[in-house]
Amino acid sequence: KQEVTQIPAALSVPEGENLVLNCSFTDSAIYNLQWFRQDPGKGLTSLLLIQSSQREQTSGRLNASLDKSSGRSTLYIAASQPGDSATYLCAVRPGGATNKLIFGTGTLLAVQP
Amino acid sequence: DAGVTQSPTHLIKTRGQQVTLRCSPKSGHDTVSWYQQALGQGPQFIFQYYEEEERQRGNFPDRFSGHQFPNYSSELNVNALLLGDSALYLCASSAQGAWEQYFGPGTRLTVT
């Protein structure tokens, strides 16, 4: 059974710091991995999607890497800003005939001005 | 493009009642998935609809049912509500065969 874990559960950093969020999954047979942002009480905004054949994806100050064999992904945020404060969720699409996503419990990020 | 829309935004129900939540997918999308997100947890997959049929189902009881209409919009129905059904219900849409799912803003259901 695929399980997704995110560490740390919460993180508080001063503005301007570079930071790394971690995601691990137990079954390496995945189609892709997606990072989402969720503001309090709101829906999910997709940040980056990495296919299983890719090693990383970049969008602006965000960079996500994927090491499928070790079951790990990291989300790197450069030069953090108070507007980056949110919960960050990673989700995997398992292999096989399924289109569902399996989510971690998220990392709550607070960037202090 | 309005993206994925959901209604209502918030809902308060009493234990034992029934509730219907609605979702309109992003333009061009034909597949709708529903997720339940309890407070402090990641979303959990409920089921997915494509071509007006339930295609996949997560580990949820039969009290949770759904429907997809010819225009691809979808409803989630929950019968005999329990306190534990209180959560944010998220709808996601995608095009069949495409990788990325787009999420709506969610419906916050409170069961008292």
Image (cartoon, coloured by chain):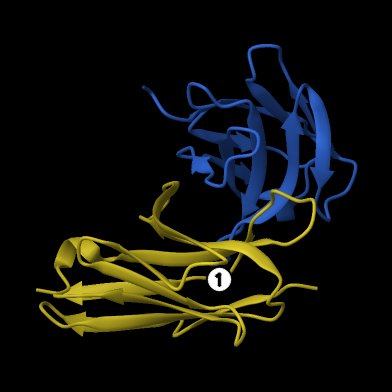
Quick check: B18 left or right of B103? right
Q: Quadrant of residue B92?
A: top right
- Residue A53 position within the rendered picture, expressed as x and y whole percent measured from the top left: 55, 67
Taking the image as drawn, is residue B7 in sight? Answer: no
Camera sees residue A100: yes
Residue topped by disc 1: A105
Residue B32's image quarter?
top right
Q: Is residue B112 left or right of residue B106?
A: right
The residue located at (20%, 60%) in the rendering is: A60
In what quadrant of the picture does the N terminus of chain B appear? top left
Residue at point 57%, 61% (across, down): A32
Check the residue under mark 1 and report the chain it is in. A
Most distant residue in the right direction = B62
In the rendered image, residue A38, in percent from the top left (x then y), is placed at 40, 56
Query: What SS does tag 1 mark?
Result: loop
| Camera-side residue of A44 and A101 | A101
Which residue is at a point 70% across and 52% down the rendered structure image? B45
The type of residue carrying mark 1 is Thr
**Position in image of residue A93 (x %, y %):** 64, 59
Relative horizontal placement of residue A50, taking residue B84 as reference (left or right): left
Between A58 and A4, the residue placed more toward the observer is A58
Q: Position of residue A70 (x, y in %)?
A: 60, 88
Is residue A75 positioned above or below B14 on the image? below
Chain letter corresponding to the colour yellow: A
Is B80 positioned to the left or the right of B10 in the image?
right
Chain (blue) = B
Mark 1, other Cα within 10 Å: few <14 / some 14–19 / many ≥20: many
Residue B50 vertical placement versus A53 (above, below): above
